[in-house]
Image: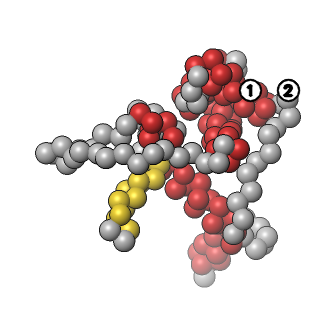
């Protein structure tokens, strides 16, 4: 499966503005702009929060691909007595996590896998798109089935 990242949007477009803000914040701060910073800046200009969130995700993917991926060096974490782990700032930044982030955690072949929920959801959407055979809306199909069952 080939992963295709979105091309950079045109200057002067609504989605292009989100990317421009993300670039400007990153340049000004000397680090990658956080999701919250970009969304707040775009909404302050009258933009839609959902557009900002989606385009921030696309900007991050594009930026990561251009830089060879978001990677951090391996770090050793010490588990607290109560089982808590603290993710270092570099790890949180590489994953685009803020204080509201939800994480999916699973054990796979003896490894702890932590995935931001937003990425897991995006992967699920991509899988569904791959299975779409172009037969129309699955919601409309489900409603038609339910109505047919109700008539019987």
Q: Quadrant of residue 105?
A: bottom left
Position of residue 84 in the picture relative to residue 105 (left or right): left
- 151, above or below 37, in the image: below
Estimate the spatial distance between the alpha carbons at disc 1 and disc 2, rounded to whole Å: 9 Å
Closest to the observer, 66 or 46: 66
Secondary structure type for disc 1: helix
- 137, above or below 10, in the image: below
Position of residue 132 in the picture relative to residue 124 (left or right): right
Q: Quadrant of the N terminus?
A: bottom right
- Picture coordinates of residue 90 (x, y %)? 45, 36
Position of residue 125 in the picture relative to residue 14 (left or right): left
> Farthest front residue?
73
Residue for badge 2: 12
Position of residue 96 in the picture relative to residue 83 (left or right): right
- Picture coordinates of residue 9 (x, y %)? 81, 38
Q: Quadrant of residue 40?
A: top right
Residue for badge 1: 20
Residue in the picture at 56% in, 27% down: 31
Could one spot residue 47 in this view of the protein? Answer: no
């Amino acid at each position: 499966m080939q992963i295709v990242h979105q091309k950079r949007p045109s200057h002067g477009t609504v989605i292009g503005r989100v990317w421009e803000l993300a670039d400007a914040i990153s340049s000004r701060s000397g680090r990658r702009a956080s999701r919250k910073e970009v969304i707040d800046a775009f909404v302050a200009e009258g933009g839609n929060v959902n557009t900002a969130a989606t385009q921030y995700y696309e900007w991050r993917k594009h930026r990561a691909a251009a830089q060879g991926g978001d990677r951090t060096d391996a770090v050793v974490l010490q588990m607290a007595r109560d089982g808590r782990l603290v993710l270092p700032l570099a790890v949180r930044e590489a994953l685009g996590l803020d204080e509201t982030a939800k994480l999916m955690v699973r054990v796979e072949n003896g490894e702890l896998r932590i995935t931001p929920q937003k990425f897991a959801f995006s992967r699920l959407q991509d899988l569904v798109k791959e299975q779409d055979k172009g037969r129309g809306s699955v919601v409309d199909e489900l409603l038609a089935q339910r109505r047919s069952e109700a008539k019987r």
